[in-house]
């Protein structure tokens, strides 16, 4: 009855209703659009504009078209930075996501005692700002007076120099993993909680044990959430900056200022005063991230289709 | 057509105005420029100093309000707003951003000696000659005045404090291992090997691989002239000449043999090392003694000061590491008041004395460096030694003609990644000098400079 009444009300004044609905939509979206335009599109456009120029200390600014892009795609420092973060992505992200998944499954299984405490404990590092986390780990890694080195000395164990050439990438990966396992775990755990109970009951009726349920029910249901964490990780890895930048102050001869692609762009802008070229490098890095993200999504979707 | 305000005549007039302002801007952008063309008369100065004005002053010197108060007392019409925009790189990054934005830049700014050319190349600083700065020349130690002078005799800033380099050493460690204070670099190298052989946990010194400033100070001591700015756009880059190679071979050799430390300085590990007696000397500057007494408290009384070891004892020399100046930003709306402030702050006897006694900045003025109450002050941390006297004497041996490049940040970064890296990796430091040279040269050429190599 109510529905019918409403329908007739709308029908009786069709024109006015349509106008009002038409105006309300854009009005609701406007605040977002304005902010999006001001804070996202405008800087992006400005960076694109900057990347078409070249500024020299002697000679000033000249329009150079796509010259900066031509230079960047053949710039060994930029390519090395991208390659390094790609390596980082391939090794660190699977490790981190597998850990996050195991924690989420363990918590969800309900077998863990003190689940709330454990959940909070794993999540807390994410609440620590990455700058603080890196400073803390930088201290822990210290080769002379760091706690690891001192413990090693007490027990007569050889402790590697975590801040040396051969260990540094692993040391950074460890910091990033420590920071983000909890974050990814929470996303996966939340997704697990939304799986309908009926599925578990059906699986139990079919005789599935805990492992079988995890493999055949939970994992497939987690696919969208895993996809999300994977995409976040692509972006995070390729934009790696805070950790190498802060460790650089400790060991500037091990980590150089082009260590990651983002660090390279930063150095170009603030050390070399090459703002235009820095904009170019940032733009290309953005492009790399879009391509990799898209490739990851495509691969995952194709696998699901097959 | 009549409703359009822009007719042919007014259009031409507007174009004329545009080209005229362009010409004016071009004048302002010249090498010698400045807001005023001739010297400013005393009546202009008197008028400016009695007109209510607010100056903005960017500095990181703690408690500088005390010295500023002296100025405000003398010139009640002028108020100075002190802003701490960070120290070192953050300070310069903000300054550069404000200059580029065209607003928000201070009137007067703290600037280290080595950064002056980096800012004059972008026409950021005001030539203070027109404001009576030349008259101050005789008050300042010669090499400090040379550091603030431009290619055409401009005065870009007024020196505030300096850092002639010397050696602080642990008397107790020297005594324990029978080491006499080295006066030549050869003796220093021999002592480094002796000490490390006697105790593998102790090193004669730490040569921080990240410390381009100390490296430049030692090149300065050795008499190298790595950068010569012939004009604004012409630069000679020569960081790998024979003198530099001699210095590189020396330190590279010690690092390769592992008889000195090469760890990053001013980090937690480095402070701990100084407190623990891992290093028996610190090659530092005149600001080092007071700094060390605050950072290595547990070693009080054990340190002494001496000049740097020498390449040629017949001609003792030293370099400078650190110290800073007050400069006036060219875009200031109150050039007279700003210039007077920069001069007063550093040359007024009361203000200069306060810097030396309250902030413990090492003075650049001849008056203070011969003032008995300053140079004859015994410091307990150094066993009662007259450390200021030691560094005042060292200051007299600093070479006059050392110049800095107009793109210091890039030079420093490239140093760490070539020469610094060779020290920590124990590879060929002399070859690394060549890489450094090639990286700076490439950068300079890309920036439009005419580069002359040796």
Image (spheres, rainbow, N blue to C red):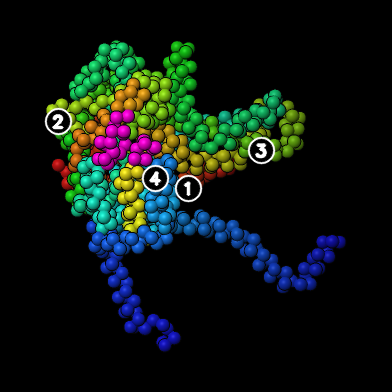
Q: From the viewer's side, name the closer residue of B384 and B200.
A: B384
Nearer to us: label 1 or label 2: 2
Q: Does residue B158 sit above or below B375 in this rendering?
A: below
Which residue, given by chain and number where applicable, does mark 3 sit on?
A: A190
Q: From the viewer's side, name the closer residue of B141 and A15.
A: B141
Label 2 marks which chain's residue?
B
Which numbered circle lies on residue B67? 4
Helix, strand or loop at mark 3 = helix
Residue at image coords 64%, 31%: A120
Q: Are marks 1 and 4 on the same chain?
A: no
Nearer to us: label 2 or label 3: 2
Instruction: Quote the CA–CA distance across marks 4 and 3.
Output: 60 Å
* Res. B427 visible in picture: no
Helix, strand or loop at mark 1 = helix
Circle 2 Cα neighbour tier, 10 Å, few/some/many (<14 / 14–19 / ≥20): few
Instruction: Quote the CA–CA distance across marks 3 and 1.
Output: 27 Å
Nearer to us: label 1 or label 4: 4
B376 drawn magenta? yes
Q: Does residue B375 sit above or below B441 in this rendering?
A: above
Circle 1 Cα neighbour tier, 10 Å, few/some/many (<14 / 14–19 / ≥20): some
Which residue, given by chain and number where applicable, does mark 1 sit on?
A: A290
Nearer to us: label 2 or label 4: 4
Nearer to us: label 3 or label 1: 3
Which residue, given by chain and number where applicable, does mark 2 sit on?
A: B315
Do the numbered discs 1 and 2 sit on residues whose CB atoms are within 8 Å? Answer: no
Residue at image coords 19%, 53%: B152
Do the numbered discs 3 and 1 sit on residues whose CB atoms are within 8 Å? Answer: no
Label 4 marks which chain's residue?
B
Residue B442 x/y as whole percent:
24, 45
Q: In terms of sequence position, does the residue under pointer 2 or pointer 4 come before the other?
A: 4
């Amino acid at each position: 009855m109510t529905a019918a009444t409403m329908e007739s009300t709308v029908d009786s004044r069709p024109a006015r209703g349509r106008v009002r609905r038409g105006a309300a939509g854009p009005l609701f979206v406007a605040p977002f659009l304005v902010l999006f335009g001001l804070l996202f599109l405008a800087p992006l456009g400005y960076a694109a504009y900057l990347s078409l120029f070249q500024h020299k200390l002697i000679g000033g600014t000249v329009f150079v078209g796509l010259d900066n892009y031509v230079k960047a795609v053949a710039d060994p420092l930029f390519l090395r930075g991208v390659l390094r973060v790609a390596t980082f992505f391939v090794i660190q992200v699977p490790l981190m996501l597998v850990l996050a998944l195991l924690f989420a499954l363990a918590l969800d299984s309900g077998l863990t005692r003190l689940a709330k405490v454990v959940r909070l404990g794993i999540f807390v590092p994410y609440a620590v700002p990455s700058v603080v986390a890196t400073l803390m780990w930088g201290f822990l890694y210290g080769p002379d007076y760091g706690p690891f080195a001192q413990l090693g000395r007490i027990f007569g164990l050889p402790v590697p120099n975590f801040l040396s050439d051969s260990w540094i990438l692993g040391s950074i990966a460890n910091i990033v993993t420590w920071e983000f396992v909890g974050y990814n775990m929470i996303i996966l755990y939340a997704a697990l909680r939304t799986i309908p109970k009926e599925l578990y009951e059906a699986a139990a009726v079919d005789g599935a044990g805990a492992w079988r349920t995890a493999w055949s029910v939970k994992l497939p249901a987690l696919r969208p959430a895993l996809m999300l964490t994977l995409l976040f990780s692509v972006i995070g890895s390729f934009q790696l900056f805070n950790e190498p930048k802060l460790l650089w102050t400790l060991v500037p001869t091990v980590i150089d200022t082009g260590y990651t692609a983002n660090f390279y762009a930063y150095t170009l802008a603030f050390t070399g005063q090459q703002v235009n070229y820095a904009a170019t490098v940032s733009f290309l890095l953005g492009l790399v991230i879009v391509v990799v993200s898209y490739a990851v999504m495509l691969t995952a979707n194709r696998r699901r289709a097959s | 057509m009549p409703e359009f305000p822009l007719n042919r005549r007014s259009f031409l007039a507007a174009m004329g105005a545009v080209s005229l302002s362009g010409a004016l801007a071009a004048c302002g952008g010249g090498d010698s420029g400045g807001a005023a063309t001739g010297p400013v008369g005393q009546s202009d100065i008197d008028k400016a100093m009695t007109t209510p004005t607010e100056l903005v002053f960017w500095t990181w010197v703690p408690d500088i309000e005390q010295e500023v108060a002296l100025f405000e007392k003398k010139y009640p019409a002028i108020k100075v707003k002190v802003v701490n925009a960070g120290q070192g790189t953050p300070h310069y990054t903000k300054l550069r951003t404000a200059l580029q934005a065209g607003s928000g830049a201070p009137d007067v700014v703290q600037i280290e000696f080595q950064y002056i050319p980096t800012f004059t190349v972008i026409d950021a600083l005001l030539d203070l000659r027109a404001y009576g700065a030349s008259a101050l020349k005789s008050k300042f130690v010669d090499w400090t005045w040379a550091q603030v002078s431009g290619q055409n005799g401009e005065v870009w800033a007024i020196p505030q404090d300096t850092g002639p380099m010397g050696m602080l050493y642990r008397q107790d460690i020297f005594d324990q291992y029978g080491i006499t204070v080295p006066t030549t670099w050869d003796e220093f190298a021999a002592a480094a090997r002796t000490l490390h052989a006697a105790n593998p946990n102790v090193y004669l010194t730490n040569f921080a691989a990240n410390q381009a400033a100390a490296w430049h100070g030692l090149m300065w001591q050795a008499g190298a002239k790595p950068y010569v700015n012939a004009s604004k756009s012409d630069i000679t880059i020569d960081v790998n000449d024979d003198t530099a190679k001699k210095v590189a071979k020396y330190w590279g050799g010690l690092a390769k043999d592992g008889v000195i430390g090469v760890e990053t300085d001013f980090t937690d590990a480095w402070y701990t090392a100084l407190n623990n007696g891992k290093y028996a000397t610190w090659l530092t500057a005149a600001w080092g003694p007071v700094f060390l007494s605050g950072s290595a408290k547990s070693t009080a009384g054990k340190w002494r000061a001496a000049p740097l070891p020498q390449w040629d004892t017949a001609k003792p020399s030293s370099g400078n590491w650190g110290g800073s100046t007050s400069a006036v930003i060219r875009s200031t709306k109150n050039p007279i008041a700003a210039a007077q402030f920069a001069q007063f702050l550093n040359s007024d006897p009361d203000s200069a004395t306060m810097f030396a006694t309250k902030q413990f900045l090492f003075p650049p003025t001849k008056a203070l460096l011969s003032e008995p109450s300053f140079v004859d002050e015994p410091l307990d941390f150094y066993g009662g030694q007259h450390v200021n006297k030691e560094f005042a004497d060292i200051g007299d041996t600093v070479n006059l003609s050392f110049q800095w490049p107009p793109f210091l940040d890039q030079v420093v970064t490239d140093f760490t990644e070539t020469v610094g890296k060779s020290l920590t990796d124990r590879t060929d430091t002399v070859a690394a000098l060549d890489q450094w040279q090639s990286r700076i040269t490439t950068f300079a050429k890309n920036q439009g400079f005419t580069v002359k190599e040796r």
